[in-house]
Amino acid sequence: MEGFKIKSVKARQVFDSRANPTVEVDITLNDGTVGRGIVPSGASTGLFEAVELRDGEETFDGKGVSKAIHHVNEQLAPLLLDMDVRDQKAIDSRLIEIDGTPNKSRLGANAILGCSMAACWAGANYYKVPLYRYLGGSAANKLPVPMVQIIGGGAHADNAIDIQDFLVIPTSASTFSEGYEMVVNVYNAAKMIFKGAGKPVSIADEGGLWPTGFQSNEEGLKLLCESIELAGYTPGQDLGIALDIASSEFYDQERGTYRLELEKKTLTKEEMVGMLSDWVDKYPIISIEDGMSELDWEGNLLLTQKLGKKIQLVGDDLFTTNIERIRKGVEMKVDNAVLIKMNQIGTITETIETIEFTQNHGYLPVVSARSGETEDCTIVHLAIATNAGQLKVGSAARSERTAKWNEVLRIEEALGSSARYPSKGVFAAAGIQFNQY
Ligand code: PGA
Ligand code: ZN
């Protein structure tokens, strides 16, 4: 009996960080090795993502996953039995083939991804090597630069402010742990500022501070600079600012306009580009994600023409980890970076192929968690396996977030002197010349 063959596949319901049900899959091999994957879930999901199958019935407000679980146990499991777990590509191809739709809508991307994740963990565990080593081989040694949320807004904070993520990226650190410590100090400084202003220190979906009582979106940028300074660093020198505008959430497709509810302002696409570009002039912003809507290619092009040489421009909802959409971006010269989310595309193999495609076309991959997360650390290993260079998992609080950051710290220790840390050099690959550096 060959130990590396799949003996059983079992899906069950577990819960994510927003108290929603999600799919967990265990794959057991003939030799008793087990691999487990737990599927994450977004809130500001892109229109072009692979389909997350939800029951749509009364239980859990329609968010049940019993159909997806049933699909794993009844339809996928029998066809995965006896497969060689070491051949991740063959497993993922079979999953795609059984589903048979372009967007995984028949069986659900959550059902499929759970199996794909569990299989790769089982493969790594079979060889008794860490997942990043199993997927990436001996050349996998680049630790990611962290992009960490300090304030959470948009759909992750009941739309208290329009902009979804106010984040920081350490730029003067020479190791991951040094960079991450800087971020933690900034997060705690931001908390002190909230307390000092009499604001409640409550936290949003990804662990960032809940923006109570903000008068404008720009207030978040000022607060980030103050927090960086209070923590003893220089904004723009030691840490840069990143924003995830998640603008698809407030785009009016019919009119082609953007609505900032907090400020009661409606902006044309030119005005939206103008506002973002003014912010880049005023604040040490080094990365903007989804500055324009997933439906607004023209706006995205305008933004890239304005800022694409100065800062990182990341497509999340615009690209949805989908090679065909990224290809269009490359051809149109829209954006210079791609947010990578496993469940936007639905298998590990496709996610790795998308990262490679991104790198081969001179765009920067940013491996990312979702707003609904669990203790699962697959994305950390994926980022290191592919030498992606950047990782975004929300804030420095809440254990579904710290599970990931702490895993990077452990891998840094394990890699020892073979670890590489690109720091701000990661941005050079896309030809970005920051104003400040
Ligand atoms: P989501 O948010 O997981 O709710 O889509 C994360 C992001 O927009 O980057
Ligand atoms: Zn995003």
Image (tube, helix red, strand yellow):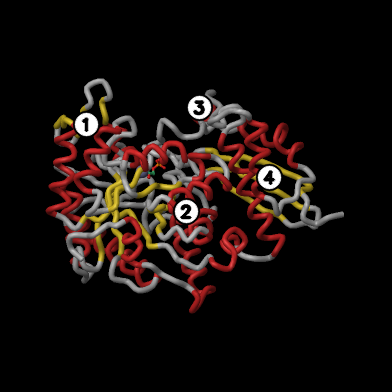
Using residue 19 as the reference point, say whether residue 155 is left or right of it. Answer: left
**Kind of residue at disc 1:** Tyr
Residue depicted at x 38% and y 67% = 422
Mark with earlier residue (3, 4): 3
Residue depicted at x 75% and y 37% = 79
Q: Tell me if mark 3 has few (under 14), some (14-19) or many (20+) residues whose alpha carbon lies within 10 angstroms of its own.
A: few
Dot in front, 1 or 4 = 4
Looking at the picture, does residue 391 appear above or below residue 302? below
Cα–Cα gap, marks 1 and 3: 30 Å
The C terminus, quarter of image: bottom left
Which dot marks residue 400? 2
Q: Is residue 97 visible?
A: yes
Mark with earlier residue (1, 4): 4
Q: Residue furthest top?
A: 254
Circle 3 sits on which residue?
62
Q: Is mark 4 within 8 Å of ligand 1?
A: no
Asked if marks 3 and 2 touch (Cβ < 8 Å), the reply is: no
Circle 4 sits on which residue?
90
Circle 1 sits on which residue?
258
Residue depicted at x 37% and y 52% = 207
Cα–Cα gap, marks 3 and 2: 23 Å
Mark with earlier residue (1, 2): 1
**Kind of residue at disc 3:** Gly
Which dot marks residue 320? none
Asked if marks 1 and 4 touch (Cβ < 8 Å), the reply is: no
